[in-house]
Image: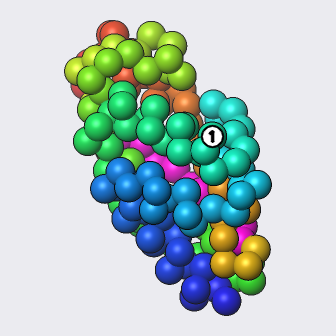
Amino acid sequence: MADRNMDIVRKWVEVANRQDWDGMVELYAEEGTYKSPRGIVTGKEAIRRAFQGLFEVQPNLHTEITNIFGGGDSVAIEIIARGNTVKHWPAVPGSVAGRSMENNAVHIFRFRDGRIVSDTAYYDSAVLARQLAGAQPNG
């Protein structure tokens, strides 16, 4: 079961990187949830809107898995996400267009019947805010 779930998570990264929202939401259960420091959304269509909104701000966002662990109904991945903003991101106060970001994150996925029922993302939102704010630190 863990290998199958890890394959689903790898597919989740692949479809996100190609911005295939139909492919992405098909991986979630109807009542699936996505939780991050920005909040929680529930249901396939809300998850679709959340990720579409992210890619509207960073259309070249690319995620790379650096580590993956699985057991039972859970999979955890460590990732590096990189992208450039093309406009202000309302979820990141002070963000401006034209900024680059590289953010490390961990996602913990839980599965039921081969579908994602919960995806919880952990990342340092302060680092993200510093990278995307109007004034970039020197160095």
Highlighted range, magenta: 101-111
Left or right: residue 35 compared with residue 81: right
**Residue 52 image-quadrant placement:** top left
Q: Is residue 108 visible?
A: no
Name above or below for residue 106 compared with residue 8.
Answer: above
Q: Give the quarter of the figure containing the C terminus.
A: top left
Residue tagged by mark 1? 46
Residue drawn at x 50%, y 17% is: 90
Q: Nearer the viewer, residue 127 or 33?
A: 33
Name above or below for residue 79 compared with residue 82.
Answer: below
Q: Nearer the viewer, residue 42 or 83?
A: 42
Residue drawn at x 38%, y 37% is: 55
Q: How far across and how far down the image is residue 99, in percent?
A: 27, 24
* Residue 103: in magenta span: yes
Q: How far across and how far down the image is residue 117, in percent?
A: 73, 62
Q: How far across and how far down the image is residue 112, in percent?
A: 76, 74
At label 1, which amino acid type do we have? Ala
Left or right: residue 9 compared with residue 43: left
Name above or below for residue 74 compared with residue 32.
Answer: below
Left or right: residue 54 compared with residue 58: right
